[in-house]
Amino acid sequence: MSSNMTEKLIAAHLTSGDMRPGEEIGLRIDQALIQDATGTMVMLELEALGLDRVHTELAAQYVDHNLLQTDERNMADHVFLRSACRRYGIWHSRPGNGVSHPTHMQYFGMPGKTLAGSDSHTCAAGSLGMLAIGVGGLEVAMAMAGQPLFVTMPEIWGVRLTGALPPWVSAKDVILEMLRRHGVRGGVHRIIEYHGPALATLSAMDRHVIANMGAELGATTSVFPADKQVLEFLRAQGRAADHTELAADPGAGYDLEEEIDLSTLEPLIARPGSPGNVIPVRQATGEPVHQVVVGSSANPGLRDFAVVAEILRGRQVHPQVSLDVNPTSRQILIDLTKMGAITTLIEAGARIHQTGCLGCIGMGQAPAVGRNSLRTFPRNFPGRSGTHDDSVWLCSPETAAVAALTGAITDPRDLGLDHPRVPLPRTVSLGTALLEAPLPPDAAQRVELAKAPSIGSLPELEPLPDSLTLPVVLKVGDDISTDEIMPAGARALPYRSNIEALADFAYTQIDPDYPRRAREAGPHAIVGGRNYGQGSSREHAAIVPRYLGLRVVIAKSFARIHWQNLANFGVLPLEFADESDYDRIGRELHFEGLRKAVENGTELTVDGIVLRHRLSARQRAMVLAGGWIPLSRQSR
């Protein structure tokens, strides 16, 4: 029987369950990825689990988020993370080495491998023919401890690509077209597998752009074949031996099928507020622009920066525009310098920043209130930039560069220029990475964790009671993101390892009074709309409200990662059997016989409203115990 690429990857790593959509399956994990904004919690979880050394083939920690060292806390986290890497046998990527996703692709990505990462954009590694899934930090910790990664078997969505991209249209426009067609919920409970003749025209880094923003569709991950383009990428990295040719069998089928003719695409842009709010650039022509930021894991390739430099060559950035450039890896920064692109960008008026996520997660480069900022980033959720009343648009490097020249959103095809062709080096700069290999086991056991006073510990989580009376402390609408639940940015990120201090930021972008009311209420509930918890994988969005007393979230539907994170920390995620009951829910909820209902997987009727959950037997046991860590302690 013919199998598609995704089925082959899953079957090769399946440890439990059946490959039927909706069934929970367990996957053996080969590699783990951690970044510093989520990594401090992962390391504290490894400590709580009593782990001696990671069991995955490879684990890598990247310091790419908390790079603004405005006081001692971020540096204290960095010291702690390095000590934990040395203790547990993890590769350590130092500050300035690069954003996790492109850097992992350069040095560790391998076709046919599974990758679990504590960052929702881990799915970018699907560009190399990997099964790469973003999850909460605790799930990565468990995978590093040798446990399977549990996911709900998704539908497999085959997207056939034909034709070739026309001038001034690039890979970013491909994924923006997917978002234009399907919105931020279109990929929920699905894996997107790209195939078709047009793949021969898309480089591995083009595929990275598309796979990365599959997270914005809500997809479990995206998968590309490991073909000649992947071999060419690995050869340039000096890793041709790591290539294995992988593709779908001839005649393989998919649960859903779609086709995109690349030759019909035009420059696209996502309007402020959501990556799914996509329109043609021509419909926004003339909107004034005051900031342009190039970089992030969504457009991380050498080409993405070099094409901006070529468009700007011999020209000057418009006087009202701040053009900020964040190279995404040390390797790319060096190659841009060798090519002369950095000089070109500086001469044009660009500001060159250090390699890292930075403005993508609100760590600097916050725009002016109400002024348009065009970014080659993956997300533009309200306030994510670090400015509460922001106006962030998402676009391709070409559209961004042209706006930097004109001072307004402009269809790049209207500028009257030939689209630049940028010759890229066949071999990139090697041996320049700030990577520290794991210590041998004997040496690692002698390392002590370096925990500064600013680094806290995991809260103790009590079991789910049988009877609960819960005030509804907060009621929110559709598509609430984890950025809104637990913001990133320069104010909050320094407290990532201190749950007590971080609690002051919970939900404050939605309701500044939530932390006070939650503390006063103690055990409480929150009610949400559709796609509750979309966006980042940060488990702080579950841990911190749980610390403040959150026991139940009732929503019309949940985003995959946040739904799992809530269960991981003992918060019961319930869904309305009838969505119209969202409008009927009262200010206080009364639960009786709760433990039996959860244990049996039955529906609950609360104050005349029918609620249900999709938790597996494993997840139900976690919620009853108060979370995954309390449950694991019970089984010791």
Image (cartoon, rainbow, N blue to C red):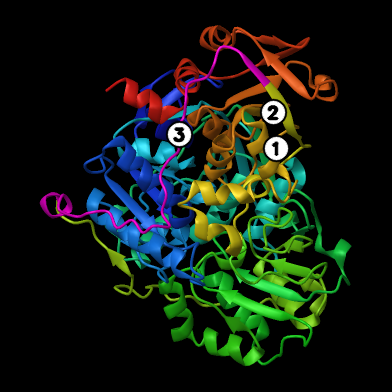
For residue 245, say whether it is visible: no
Residue on which the image places disc 2: 557
The N terminus lies in quadrant: top left
The image's mark for residue 249 is 3
Query: Mark 1: which amino acid?
Result: Arg
Secondary structure beneath label 1: loop
Q: Nearer the viewer, residue 235 or 34?
A: 34
Q: Nearer the viewer, mark 1 or mark 2?
A: 2
Q: Is residue 575 left or right of residue 633?
A: right
Q: Image quadrant of residue 247? A: top left
Q: Nearer the viewer, residue 496 or 222?
A: 496
The answer to whether mark 3 and mark 2 are in CB contact below 8 A is no
Q: Up-down: is 450 above or below 31? A: below
The answer to whether mark 1 and mark 2 are in CB contact below 8 A is yes
Query: Mark 3: which amino acid?
Result: Asp
Q: Which percent across, then down, holds residue 149?
A: 40, 32
Q: Up-down: is 610 above or below 107? A: above
- Report if residue 544 lies within the magenta region: no
Where does the magenta region start and end?
441-469
Q: Is residue 532 left or right of residue 238?
A: right
The image's mark for residue 185 is 1
Report how far apart the C-alphas of labels 1 and 3 lie in the structure. Answer: 29 Å
* Number of marks in the rendered image: 3
Q: Which percent across, then down, holds residue 48?
A: 33, 38
